[in-house]
Amino acid sequence: MLPKEDRFTSRLFDAKFKKSRSFRWKDCLFLVSSDNDRSHCAVVVSKKVAKLAVRRNRIRRQIYELLRFHLYKYLRKQNVICLYKGDQIFQNSQDFVEGLGKLRQFLSRSPNKASFSRHR
């Protein structure tokens, strides 16, 4: 799990959600925005994915751990929101790690040259 100061607050989440560019990979939609202060991460798992809070929280914890281990050290004052739309808990995290590698490439491109879609 990420340290508490590196996770979003609800006020910060709303502000950054509107000014983000998006990157879609399989069951995840990553919303990325810049920040002057520090990097923050958030994971959102909808009730449509899993009705039981226990299952949603397990998916959320797994994604947070993968973000912490494979992505967080590469963020440079960038905010990442992961919207998970899959329907199951990860059996093999290697697939998700591959997506994080593609997200790292997306983050390393400058926003002016990168092709991205604006989230509304």
Image (cartoon, rainbow, N blue to C red):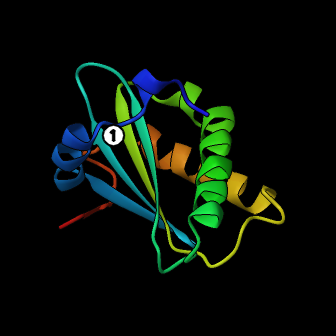
Q: Is residue 73 above or below residue 107?
A: above
Label 1 element class: loop
Of residues 86 and 106, the one drawn nearer to the viewer in this rendering? 86
Quick one: quadrant of the N terminus? Answer: top right
Residue name at image x 57 percent, y 72 percent: 27
The amino acid on which the numbered mark 1 sits, given as a three-letter code, is Ser
Q: Position of residue 74 (x, y in %)?
A: 54, 29
Residue name at image x 80 percent, y 56 percent: 94
Q: Position of residue 84 (x, y in %)?
A: 51, 66
Q: Position of residue 96 (x, y in %)?
A: 69, 58
Of residues 42 and 57, the one drawn nearer to the viewer in this rendering? 57
Q: Which residue is mark 1?
A: 110
Q: Is residue 89 left or right of 103 when viewed as pictured?
A: right
Q: Position of residue 41 (x, y in %)?
A: 43, 39
Q: Is residue 89 left or right of 40 when viewed as pictured?
A: right
Q: Is residue 87 above or below residue 53?
A: below
